[in-house]
Image (cartoon, rainbow, N blue to C red):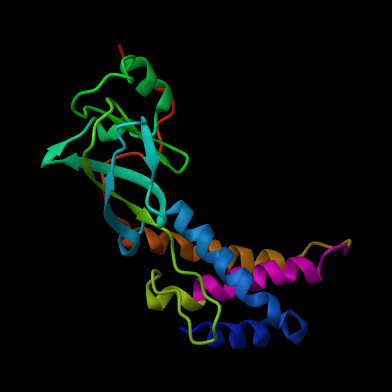
Amino acid sequence: MTLGEITELVLDVVQDDSFEDSIPAYANSCLDFITQRYELDSLNSSDLVTTDPSSNHVPLPSNYMKGLYWAQSEGNLIGTPYYYHDFKRFLRRNQGRQETGSLSDICVVGKDLHYTKRCAADIEIHFFEKPTYMSGTMDEPVCIPAHLHEPLFVNYIAWKVYDLIEDGIEDPKTNTQHYQKLFISFLPDIELFETQTDQPEFVQDEWSP
């Protein structure tokens, strides 16, 4: 379903053309809402990162969104995937980060990849990339299964638009709540299209000897 088609359906629901220009932003907000919560197979990606011998970290690829779950160099797994997002543990276990030598561990901090030892190496990383935002009327949310475009995007946008329309009323926001519940009811269907990495998305400071 194209952005233009999504727009037409939303306007049919809310019956207020003054929100037409706001719909692309709401559609991309819906895209963010979904892709930040689910590890979609359609966004499963990989890339090569080259370490810098003069530093202990380098930027992650520009399309990196979240969820680094595998890293290898010269065919060998680096570190423990379960702990790729636990920086405190990474620091505890790698006190000699200024030393040179072979790679033995990595960690994601924000948009940077930190690594042990200062050396030059290519690291193949596997992660979930950013979705492509929609702007033109013919753009589609290609990372989302086509049969879920209408129930997810139309209901999400209607929810947000009605939240503005019904703002300030004393009675319950009937339409806002209705479309919010419809959107949420279809979210579990997304789980069928997730990549099973067998790794948690984020592990925070788990103790390890």
Residue pictured at 80% horizontal, 71% vertical: 165
Overall secondary structure of the magenta section = helix
Q: How many marks?
A: 0
Check the image and report above or below for 2 versus 44: below
Q: Is residue 110 above or below residue 3?
A: above
Q: Which residue is the extreme one toward the front?
A: 54
Residue at figure coordinates x 38%, y 40% from the top left = 58
> From this viewpoint, which residue is outermost toward the left?
75
Bounds of the magenta segment: 151-169
Please check the rendered image and state whether residue 135 is part of the magenta-colored stretch, yes or no. no
Identify whether 167 is placed above or below 22.
Answer: above
Magenta region includes residue 159: yes
Q: Nearer the viewer, residue 150 or 94?
A: 94
- Residue 9 placement (x, y as % from top left): 59, 85
**At 78% from the left edge and 67% from the top edge, which residue is drawn?**
164
Q: In the image, what residue occupies the spot 48% across and 81% down?
A: 139
Tell me residue 39's x, y (percent): 37, 54
Residue nearest the viewer, comparing 172 with 37: 37
Give the farthest residue toward the top: 209
Left or right, 142 with reference to 2: left
Where is residue 48 drawn, in percent x and y?
Answer: 25, 50
